[in-house]
Image (cartoon, rainbow, N blue to C red):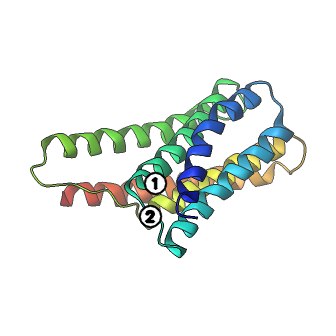
Amino acid sequence: MKYLPNILSAARLVLAPYIFWLVWRREYGAVLIWFLLSGITDGVDGWIARRWRAQSRLGAMLDPIGDKLLLSGSFLVLALDGAMEWWLAALVLGRDAVILLVAAGVLLFSKKKAEFPPSWWGKSSTVAQICYIVALVGHLGGFLPVILPEIGKWCVLAFLAISSVDYARQARRM
């Protein structure tokens, strides 16, 4: 049980390119299944790690990397395919790039050890992005009505804005 959270996070990393390939081929039924499974493992790995005290430095790195790879890649492939508006993908990817650049700057130029614990708003933004991708792919596959991805898009934007302000506030403190 000790290694299960890391295995689940690593599985998301390994599964991501396959999901991107399925999206590109517009096999939305399969994408929906694999993406839902990946999204669920995102919550389950953290719960298992906390419940059985199986947190590790490796897991603390693998989990956010797995999230960002899966979500950023999905937004990129869906935008390249024309299934999603470019401006939405650009905002999501741009915010993530800014966060990574700020974190790299803090790590390079800070004299004290910096840690970047996930914020509640950042986690909420991730959940909103997962739900949006599920709703969009579900709609593209003919399983869900168009209103769900429309609502999801605006939820992604709202949480993106709020989490960006929260991260900027945290960065100022560093």
Residue at the spot 81% in from the left edge and 29% down from the top edge: 26
The quarter holding residue 101 reads: top left
Residue at the spot 57% in from the left edge and 40% down from the top edge: 13
Tally the marks.
2
Asked if residue 148 shows in the view, the reply is: yes
The image position of residue 125, as x and y in percent, is: 52, 57
The image position of residue 55, as x and y in percent, is: 44, 64
Numbered badge on residue 165: none
Camera-side residue of 43 and 163? 43
Q: Quadrant for the N terminus, please.
A: bottom right
Camera-side residue of 83 and 35? 35
- Quickly name the residue at label 1: 59
Looking at the rendered structure, the secondary structure element under dot 2 is loop
- Residue, far right: 142
The reply to whether discs 1 and 2 touch (Cβ–Cβ < 8 Å) is yes
Asked if residue 74 shows in the view, the reply is: no
Looking at the rendered structure, the secondary structure element under dot 1 is helix
- Identified by mark 1, the residue type is Gly
Residue at the spot 64% in from the left edge and 29% down from the top edge: 77
- Identified by mark 2, the residue type is Gln
The image position of residue 146, as x and y in percent, is: 82, 48
Q: Disc 1 to disc 2, how far (Cα)?
A: 7 Å
Residue at the spot 86% in from the left edge and 51% down from the top edge: 145
Q: Quadrant for the C terminus, please.
A: bottom left
Numbered badge on residue 55: 2
